[in-house]
Image (spheres, rainbow, N blue to C red):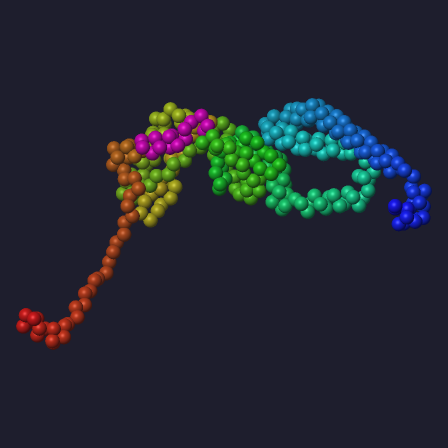
């Protein structure tokens, strides 16, 4: 039927393309693809296993030995080394699949780099850069207690983009590295001590020296407060209607002490002690008012006055 419709054309085509020719080509293509996948998997697995079991532990051990006072570098080294091992394993897998020539093609490499840079957002790149700066900072380590405008807590881990911080409430928060590098960081807890600062205001008529001495004594009476450094008190500012005082004391690890309870107990004892020595806490602001008040009374018209006299 087909030969009748197409005539000699079909016969000529059948002679040019022998039966079963494409079957061998397809079979060989599938075989090459399978060999490539197996080669990629084997090469990548071997490279990743060697890197994970040998290279990363050895690198971390060397870095930690040379930076005993900076555990942050060791933690970051493990994270960054793992990323490098994954990248190397992918390259080795590509070579194992027999596709290494693709990597030598400059146009493909440039296109891949352009795609990666274009896909990465500005915030991600900024966080990665900030993470490198944090890792290289000798004053910023895992285990440090830091405070920034968004909160405070203990640094648990520095990752590529974020830093994980554990707060006083035992909550782990994730802070972008850019937020830590863009803002001022304070170290209220450093070198195994945490500084507690409480502000109090007293009146100008009160004895400032007596109040300062009593603040120090109240702090010394608390067993949770360290004897060294010695608690101190100082005059912080002269306000419009009060004198501001600061009490400064130190405790050990803030995670071992209920800091909120400590502050509350300190305030209660200061209030009781100041009541005993007749020192006014938080005096009301004094304001002097001067001037005069005048009242204008409008005269009623004659008709209203006459109606009033007539009793209407």
Q: Quadrant of the C terminus?
A: bottom left
Estimate the x, y position of residue 295 in percent, counting from the top left.
Answer: 19, 65
Q: Is residue 46 left or right of residue 65?
A: right
Q: Which residues are magenta?
A: 254-269
Residue 298 versus residue 209 in the image, above or below? below
Estimate the x, y position of residue 74 in percent, counting from the top left.
Answer: 63, 28
Q: Is residue 132 left or right of residue 216?
A: right
Dividing the picture into quarters, in which one does residue 212 lie? top left
**So how many labels did they put on this image?**
0
Dividing the picture into quarters, in which one does residue 229 lie? top left
Inspect the magenta stretch and tell me whether residue 260 lies in it. yes
**Residue 96 shows in this picture:** no
Residue 168 versus residue 113 in the image, above or below? above
Estimate the x, y position of residue 283 in percent, counting from the top left.
Answer: 29, 43
The residue that appears at 54% across and 38% down in the rendered structure is 175
Inspect the magenta stretch and tell me whether residue 140 lies in it. no
Q: Is residue 243 left or right of residue 257?
A: left
**Residue 163 shows in this picture:** yes
């Amino acid at each position: 039927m087909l030969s009748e419709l197409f005539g000699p054309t079909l016969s000529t085509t059948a002679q040019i393309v022998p039966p079963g020719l494409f079957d061998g080509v397809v079979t060989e293509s599938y075989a090459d693809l399978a060999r490539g996948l197996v080669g990629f998997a084997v090469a990548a697995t071997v490279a990743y296993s060697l890197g994970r079991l040998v290279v990363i532990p050895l690198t971390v051990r060397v870095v930690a030995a040379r930076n005993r006072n900076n555990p942050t570098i060791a933690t970051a080294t493990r994270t960054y080394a793992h990323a490098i091992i994954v990248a190397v394993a992918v390259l080795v897998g590509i070579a194992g699949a027999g596709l290494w020539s693709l990597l030598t093609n400059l146009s493909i490499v440039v296109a891949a780099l352009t795609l990666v840079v274009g896909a990465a957002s500005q915030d991600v790149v900024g966080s990665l850069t900030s993470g490198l700066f944090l890792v290289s900072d000798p004053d910023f380590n895992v285990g440090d207690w830091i405070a920034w405008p968004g909160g405070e807590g203990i640094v648990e881990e520095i990752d590529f983009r974020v830093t994980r911080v554990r707060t006083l409430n035992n909550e782990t928060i994730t802070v972008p590295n850019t937020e830590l590098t863009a803002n001022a960081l304070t170290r209220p807890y450093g070198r195994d001590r945490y500084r507690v600062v409480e502000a109090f205001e007293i009146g100008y008529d009160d004895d400032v020296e007596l109040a300062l001495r009593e603040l120090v004594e109240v702090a010394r009476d608390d067993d949770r407060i360290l004897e060294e450094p010695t608690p101190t008190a100082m005059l912080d500012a002269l306000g419009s209607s009060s004198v501001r005082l600061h009490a400064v004391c130190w405790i050990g690890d803030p995670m071992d002490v209920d800091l909120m309870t400590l502050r509350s107990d300190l305030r209660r004892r200061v209030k009781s002690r100041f009541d005993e020595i007749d020192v006014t806490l938080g005096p009301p602001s004094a304001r002097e008012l001067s001037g005069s008040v005048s009242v204008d009374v409008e005269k009623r018209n004659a008709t209203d006055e006459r109606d009033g006299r007539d009793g209407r």
